[in-house]
Image (tube, rainbow, N blue to C red):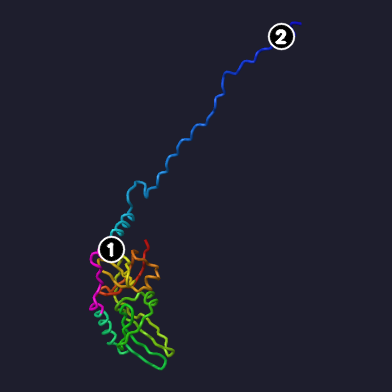
């Protein structure tokens, strides 16, 4: 009987605590290094060229601020360009023709209009002058038909050179200028707006190669 009343074994308390398992803290990621322009960290040729171009722009702006900007050519220079081209036109027997259907007049572009061999001044559409990149001294032909329509054509471009400068605008008159080498040349507004140019942009323009001019033709505008 005594076997029926055996003492139950006491359950031993669990002394060992369950260790908390914390996941290790994530290691901080290494910062991604910014890619260099080249493997050795040196400036490329294009980097140097861009830096020089920017320096030139700043120098041109400083020259304008100090001198106020000098128009590339005087009125006498422009008059001389027109006079030389006009002499060439007058030496032609057919500089002005007229028949029943149309009248043909040759003339010289002077920046905005054409001075005809008949002594009259004819307005040249700004869009045509811009598209054709007309330069002071270009010889043109104007055809007036019996319907009164004016048709212009560039027949002998003057020798020209290409220059690179900065686009500037007078805040009062809103006249645009191409600025380079401390000088400035007037630009047709239509030429600038065609390229959506703004003051400070880089501009490629054309001027007569030998004589000074007051106007220039826009060839291209590079927006920075």
Q: Specify which label sits upstream in the sequence, 1 or 2.
A: 2
Is residue 67 found inside the magenta-colored segment of the image? yes
* Quadrant location, the C terminus: bottom left
Q: Nearer the viewer, residue 212 or 22?
A: 22
Residue 77, how many percent across, how many down? Answer: 23, 77
Q: Is residue 207 above or below residue 116?
A: above
Q: Residue furthest top?
A: 2
Residue 162, how many percent across, how many down? Answer: 30, 69
Residue extent of the magenta highlight: 57-78
Element carrying mark 1:
helix
Q: Residue furthest right?
A: 1
Is residue 149 found inside the magenta-colored segment of the image? no
Mark 2 Cα within 10 Å, few/some/many (few <14, many 20+)?
few
Residue 208, how many percent across, how many down? Answer: 28, 74
Residue 153, how many percent across, how many down? Answer: 37, 81
Q: Which residue corresponds to mark 2? A: 6
Q: Nearer the viewer, mark 1 or mark 2?
A: 2
> Magenta region, mostly helix, strand or loop?
helix
Q: Please report the residue visible at 28 percent of the width from the left and 84 percent of the height from the top.
A: 86
Q: Residue furthest bottom?
A: 100
Residue 61: mark in rendering: 1
């Amino acid at each position: 009987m005594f076997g029926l009343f055996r003492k139950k074994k006491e359950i031993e308390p669990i002394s060992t605590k369950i260790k908390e398992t914390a996941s290790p803290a994530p290691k901080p990621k290494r910062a991604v290094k910014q890619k260099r322009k080249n493997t050795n960290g040196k400036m490329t040729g294009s980097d140097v060229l861009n830096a020089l171009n920017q320096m030139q722009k700043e120098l041109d702006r400083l020259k304008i601020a100090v001198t106020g900007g000098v128009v590339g050519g005087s009125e006498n220079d422009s008059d001389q360009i027109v006079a030389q081209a006009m002499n060439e036109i007058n030496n032609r027997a057919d500089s002005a023709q007229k028949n029943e259907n149309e009248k043909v007049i040759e003339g010289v572009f002077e920046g905005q209009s054409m001075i005809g061999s008949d002594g009259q001044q004819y307005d040249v559409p700004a869009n045509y002058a811009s598209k054709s990149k007309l330069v002071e001294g270009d010889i043109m032909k104007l055809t007036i038909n019996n319907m009164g329509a004016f048709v212009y054509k560039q027949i002998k471009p003057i020798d020209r050179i290409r220059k690179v400068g900065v686009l500037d605008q007078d805040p009062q008159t809103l006249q645009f200028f191409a600025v380079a080498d401390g000088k400035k040349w007037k630009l047709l507004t239509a030429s600038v707006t065609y390229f959506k140019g703004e003051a400070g942009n880089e501009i490629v323009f054309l001027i007569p190669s030998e004589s000074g001019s007051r106007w220039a033709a826009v060839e291209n505008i590079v927006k920075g």
